[in-house]
Image (spheres, rainbow, N blue to C red):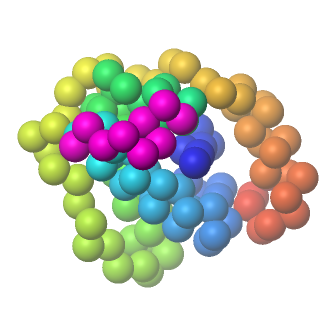
């Protein structure tokens, strides 16, 4: 599971769509108190930061629409709470750029 801290416009198709899918998984785990992946570091870093996760989703949706993808999976706004900023990182921004660069996947790094 990974939610990148990189601008969605820089992500290749696979990473953009993959992050959107994983963001929905994390949202579901946190808002429905599901046990699967609830102890995963990526899930834990978003605990108490559903507002920040919601805002990240909005950025992803904006990029999806720019790329002419249809988006039909809005998040339930009534769950939005907590911090609007994500300041906890598994990998630094610089490390994330390096990880994506090594993948040679088409991300604009």
The number of callouts visible is 0
| Image position, residue 71 (x, y; %) | 32, 72
Q: Dividing the picture into quarters, in which one does residue 53 lie?
A: top left
Position of residue 96 in the picture relative to residue 81 (left or right): right
Compared across the picture, whether 98 is left or right of 63 comes to right
* Residue furthest to the front: 35
Q: Residue at x 84, y 41 (%)?
A: 98
Most extreme residue toward the left is 78
Q: Is residue 19 above or below residue 69?
A: above
Question: Where does residue 14 sit, x and y in percent of width and height?
Answer: 63, 69
Nearest the viewer among 43 and 89 is 43
Vertical relation: 14 (above or below) 6: below
As drawn, 13 above or below 83? below
Q: Which x, y percent locates residue 6?
A: 62, 43
Q: What range of the chain is rendered magenta?
A: 32-40
| Helix, strand or loop: magenta stretch | loop
Find out whether residue 75 is within the magenta segment: no
């Amino acid at each position: 599971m990974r939610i990148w801290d990189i601008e969605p416009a820089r992500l290749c198709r696979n990473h953009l769509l993959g992050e959107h899918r994983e963001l929905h998984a994390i949202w579901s785990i946190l808002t429905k108190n599901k046990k699967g992946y609830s102890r995963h570091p990526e899930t834990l870093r978003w605990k108490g930061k559903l507002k920040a996760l919601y805002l990240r989703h909005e950025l992803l949706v904006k990029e999806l629409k720019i790329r002419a993808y249809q988006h039909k999976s809005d998040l339930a706004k009534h769950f939005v709470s907590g911090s609007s900023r994500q300041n906890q990182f598994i990998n630094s921004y610089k490390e994330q750029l390096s990880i994506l660069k090594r993948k040679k996947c088409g991300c604009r790094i």
